[in-house]
C-alpha cells in the first residue's frame, strides 16, 4: 500500500556457541606432524583463557572444527591469526568458515557437484 512505512527488524543471535572450521598451514619444511592430541594441545595453548572444544580433526588435511562460546569467538580468531610458528617453523591457522550453526559447516556450496 502506498505510504506504508518500512520497518527494520533485527534479530540478535541467541546462540551460546559458535563453530569454526580452521586449517593449519605449514610454510617451512614438511617435518611438522600433528596428530589429534598435539593439535588439541596447540589449540588449548593458543586459546588458553577460553573453553574451546575440538569437535573433529582430520590429520591428512590438518583441518578441524572447533566450538567456542560466542563471547570468545573474536578472541580465539585473533589468537589463531597471531600464531606465527610451531616447533620453530613458520606456520599459520586459516579460518575457513564460522557459524553459530554446526550444520552450516557440513558442506561447502563452492565444492557442490550436482549430477
Image (spheres, rainbow, N blue to C red):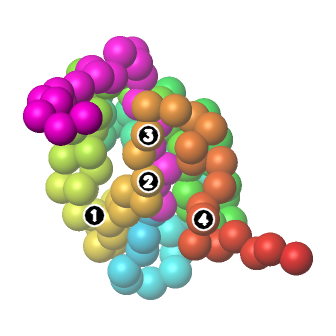
Circle 4 SS class = helix
25 horizontally vs 4: left or right: right
Q: Is residue 61 above or below residue 81?
A: below
- Comes first in the chain, label 2 or label 4: 2
- Comes first in the chain, label 4 or label 3: 3
* Percent position of residue 52, x then y: 42, 27
Q: In this picture, which residue range is highlighted in magenta?
A: 1-23
* Residue contact between numbered discs 2 and 3, judged by CB atoms under 8 Å: yes
Q: Is residue 97 above or below residue 29?
A: above
Q: Which residue has dot 3 on it?
A: 99
Rendered residue at 57%/35% (across/down): 102
Rendered residue at 11%/34% (across/down): 3
In the picture, the disc for residue 85 is 1
Q: Which residue has dot 2 on it?
A: 97
Mark 2 crowd level (few <14, some 14–19, many ≥20, 10 Å Cα): some
- Comes first in the chain, label 1 or label 4: 1
Distance from Cα at disc 4 to Cα at disc 3: 15 Å
Distance from Cα at disc 2 to Cα at disc 3: 7 Å
Circle 2 SS class = strand
* Residue contact between numbered discs 3 and 1, judged by CB atoms under 8 Å: no
Corner quadrant of residue 96: bottom left
Say if residue 45 shows up in the picture. Answer: yes
In the picture, the disc for residue 109 is 4
Rendered residue at 37%/56% (across/down): 95
| Total tally of numbered discs in the picture | 4
Disc nearest the viewer among 1 and 4: 4
- Comes first in the chain, label 1 or label 2: 1
Residue farthest to the bottom? Answer: 29
Amino acid at each position: 500500500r502506498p505510504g506504508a512505512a518500512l520497518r527494520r527488524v533485527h534479530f540478535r543471535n541467541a546462540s551460546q556457541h559458535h563453530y569454526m572450521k580452521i586449517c593449519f598451514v605449514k610454510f617451512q619444511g614438511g617435518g611438522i606432524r600433528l596428530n589429534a592430541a598435539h593439535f588439541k594441545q596447540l589449540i588449548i595453548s593458543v586459546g588458553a583463557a577460553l573453553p574451546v572444544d575440538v569437535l573433529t580433526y582430520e590429520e591428512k588435511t590438518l583441518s578441524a572444527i572447533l566450538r567456542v562460546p560466542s563471547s570468545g569467538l573474536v578472541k580465539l580468531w585473533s589468537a589463531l591469526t597471531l600464531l606465527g610458528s610451531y616447533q620453530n617453523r613458520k606456520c599459520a591457522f586459516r579460518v575457513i568458515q564460522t557459524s553459530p550453526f554446526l550444520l552450516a559447516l557440513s558442506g561447502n556450496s563452492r565444492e557442490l557437484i550436482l549430477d
